[in-house]
Image (tube, helix red, strand yellow):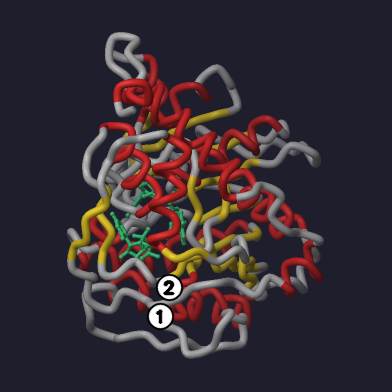
Amino acid sequence: MSELNQHIGNQSGRTPVRELYAVQSDILHKQIIVTGGAGFLGSHLCERLLRSGHRVICVDNFSTGSKQNIMHLLGYDTFSVIDHDIVEPFDLEADEIYNLACPASPPHYQADPVHTTLTSVLGAYNLLTLAARYNARIFQASTSEVYGDPHIHPQVETYWGNVNPFGPRSCYDEGKRCAETLFFDFHKAYDTEIKIVRIFNTFGPNMRPDDGRVVSNFIVQALKGEDITIYGDGKQTRSFCYVDDLIEGFVRLMAADASVTGPVNLGNPGEFMIGELAKIVIDLTGSRSRIVHHPLPVDDPRQRRPDISLAMRELGWQPQVQLTEGLEKTITYFDSRLSLSGNRLREMAR
Ligand code: NAD
Ligand code: UDP
């Protein structure tokens, strides 16, 4: 049995595990559940919370997350992992809950759209029930996708969005919108302390090479010397936030006064065309890759850029890492992860 498997408890149905993880009556060090903790963002969040001295329980079904992302955290005796699907109810005591569980990349969330909707809606319901039972503060990883293909630019939190209710992206967009509704209704009905962030495209180490989102696709293609696949004409825009900046925003929102419920936009307001991003990645990697164009996916939003005035005002937060700096770090990560027998792909792709 691997070291990780020894740390993983298997959760099916309603197994009560709170006996195993009784909350310590320690004011400084909280017991914190991170769902989706083995994913890209979740693994960074678990590390940040463990470094701050908290007891962290990662709950993940390992659908898009990986054991590799959390292997380095096993040295903390304050870290535990539970293999569980949040669509199924479970019982676990906590002071705080971060709900990040949900596939985030279009090809992954569209692979099983019914399960994606259930993850957002039933998963949120199950976690809100826990939060209400144990009086825990609960955080929801919502998304800029709640704005759909936006008519207001940049997007402010008061904008209600332009979302197709039954297109290929709807399982994700509408699931996340309904989760926000559930959060606010628990807040009103049971005084549950809620924190909602709307995350704009974020990138960095611990993304899967086959994640399918644009930054990881372009970097992996450039490092392998393969064609860089721009969908559509490449004039659609996105704003890219480096993972460390985002996690700082998460922690600040969770620590903010109870009256700060969100939703709060977190993202980098720098706006880039996808064609520009492809050229930057080619430049930074020095790759010989060619750019090719593929059809634009259905309902692909034309533009995306956060208005972060609320986060600046309420959390004193704004991104610190520029796009090229974040891309360099991410390129180094993928280069070392994908390199074979010590041969750096970056050298071979030139
Ligand atoms: P990811 O796919 O890397 O991580 C998702 C994690 O959730 C994985 O570990 C996966 O195994 C787990 N998971 C999925 N369904 C589950 C279920 N039913 N039960 C238990 N675990 C489950 O994605 P990410 O980029 O780390 O995104 C994390 C969260 O942030 C998601 O909720 C996503 O919607 C949100 N978000 C991310 C971005 C971004 O740019 N990264 C943007 C907007 C919103
Ligand atoms: N995209 C692209 N090539 C790829 C992957 C994505 O041109 O290999 C485009 C995609 O069509 C979208 C943008 O890049 O316009 C961002 O896509 P991503 O999947 O990263 O995030 P989202 O669409 O959810 O914002």
What is the three-letter code of the residue carrying label 2? Glu
Q: Quadrant of the N terminus?
A: top left
Q: Position of residue 323 (x, y in %)?
A: 57, 50
Tag 2 secondary structure: helix
In-image side of 94 versus 14 (left or right): right
Mark 1 element type: loop
Quadrant location of residue 77? top right
Q: In the figure, residue 183 lies in which quadrant?
A: bottom right
Label 1 beta carbon less than 8 Å to ligand 2:
no
Q: Please indicate, yes or no, whether residue 302 appears anywhere in the rendered image.
A: yes
Instruction: Answer left or right for 61 relative to 154.
Output: left
For the residues labelled 1 and 2, the Cα–Cα distance comes to: 5 Å
Residue 9, horizontal then vertical, whole percent: 37, 31
* Label 1 close to label 2 by CB (< 8 Å): yes
Crowding around mark 1 (Cα neighbors within 10 Å: few <14, some 14 to 19, many 20+) is many
* Residue tagged 1: 148
Residue position for label 2: 145
Expressed as whole percent of the image width and height from the top left, the position of residue 277 reads 44, 55
Residue count near mark 2 (Cα–Cα under 10 Å), binned few <14, some 14–19, many ≥20: many
Q: Is residue 319 left or right of residue 56?
A: right
Q: Amino acid at mark 1?
A: Gly
In which quadrant is the C terminus drawn?
top left
The residue at the point 21 percent across, 66 percent down is: 113
Q: Residue at the location (37% across, 41% down)?
A: 219
**Would you say the beta carbon of the disc 2 residue lies within 8 angstroms of ligand 2?**
yes
| Residue for point 71% across, 31% down | 53
Judging depth in this view, the residue of 228 and 146 nearest the camera is 228
Q: Is residue 129 visible?
A: no
Give the total number of marks visible in the rendering: 2
Q: Is residue 33 above or below residue 276?
A: above
